[in-house]
Amino acid sequence: MVYHIPWIYTPVRSVLAIWHQLTKAEIPELAKCSVLMRDRSRVEDTIYAMQRAGAGRLQVISDFDMTLTRFAHNGKRVPTTHNILDHRLLIDEDCSKKIRELLNTYYPIEIDAGRSAEDKLPLMVEWWTQVHELLIQQRIRKELLAQAVKESSTMLREGYKVFFDRLTEQQVPLLIFSAGVGDVLEEVIRQNNVFHPNVHIISNYMDFDQAGVLRAFQGQLIHTFNKREGALSHASGLRVLQGRPNVLLLGDSLGDLTMADGVSEHQNILTIGFLNDQMDERKELYVKSFDVVLVKDETMEVPNAILKYITSSTDNKLDA
Ligand code: TMP
Ligand code: MG
């Protein structure tokens, strides 16, 4: 028998072990070429542990702009919640020009793989503060926001309905943690019919006067690189998230990785990062930082597959 000859047996065993590793996952979406993982076994073990604990122990924390919304569609950038406000009904041409100039100056800094988060932090504060001041000067009217959203080209990622609906069916809370504009974000998900009762939002909310005119932004500013502070001060206090130590985290920026920092006594955290832009420059950093990296993937296919697995019945196991 060839199996009794060690120098044949060992390589055969190795090949079989590798084959088993490659085929064991019941999440075929993880084998897509757009999916990168630093440690596939760890990903599978984490998903498996989360599935065993069940939907009752799970919470999902997600960024909004360019995570739940698409990055681009038909070669054109999809607007962020801030960019949706760049509408003739809400702001004048001069303001629009200034906001675009700020975007062109600061967005490349936000995604620059060569700069640290500490280095970027004060610059992000500068960007957000200037944009918010410009918006306040425009005396934006609350009643016009819905129309601006309707006429914008905003788009949630393909498969978004399955994502939101599954979480609702399974009674899993979804915390949307966004450095965008909360009022606009709410309107986007409302118009897409997915603003379900299990959705909770932490974001920059507008403060309107009695006549419905924008006069300030509420609370402490949230930008891409201070989400940790918001997580500790706001998210940690949310009752609906208590007793749910398993976290599925979705983001598109390295700053999004701190969104789960307020989860006390967490057990398993699986982080999924959408790598939308500057792929070659940032790939290495993203693979080091997120458990699962989705390169230029405009869909919710992979998060949906993972979610389906985690919330499926206990007899469905990765190793089965
Ligand atoms: P997020 O936390 O929901 O992703 O929202 C923050 C994004 O918004 C971030 O990637 C930068 C972007 N942004 C704009 O597109 N325009 C702006 O004027 C500002 C201040 C931010
Ligand atoms: Mg984002």
Image: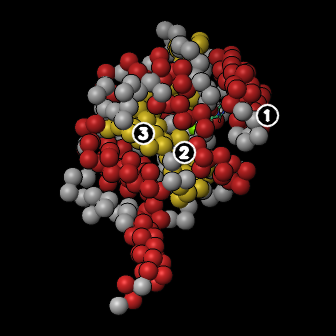
Q: Nearer the viewer, mark 3 or mark 1?
A: 3
Residue 163 located left or right of residue 202: left
Q: Position of residue 232 (x, y in %)?
A: 47, 20
Between marks 2 and 1, how big is the CA–CA gap? 27 Å
The secondary structure type at the circle numbered 3 is: strand
* Location of mark 1 (residue): 105
Q: Residue furthest front?
A: 5
* Element type at mark 1: helix
Using residue 247 as the reference point, say whether residue 143 is left or right of it. Answer: right
User: The N terminus is located in which quarter?
Assistant: bottom left
Quadrant housing residue 56: top left
The earlier-in-sequence mark between 2 and 3 is 3
* 88 over 274 or under it: above or below: above
Q: In this rendering, does residue 266 appear at all?
A: yes
Position in image of residue 51 (x %, y %): 29, 48
Residue at (31%, 21%) from the top-left corner?
A: 239
Return the mark for residue 269: 3
Residue 141: quarter of image: top right
Residue at the (40%, 54%) spot, across then down: 44
Residue projecting furthest to the bottom: 1
Quarter where residue 4 is shown: bottom left
Q: Do residues under tags 3 and 1 come within 8 Å of each other at their CB atoms?
A: no
Comparing 202 with 206, the one in front is 202
The structure residue drawn at horizontal position 42% and vertical position 39%, both measured from the top left corner, is 269
Query: What amino acid type is highlighted by mark number 3?
Result: Ile
The correct choice, above or below, for 320 with respect to 135 in the image is below
In the image, which disc is placed on residue 290? 2
| Mark 2 or mark 1: whose residue is earlier in sequence | 1
**Badge 2 element:** loop
Is label 1's Cβ within 8 Å of ligand 1?
no
Query: Ligand 2 within 8 A of label 3's CB?
Result: no
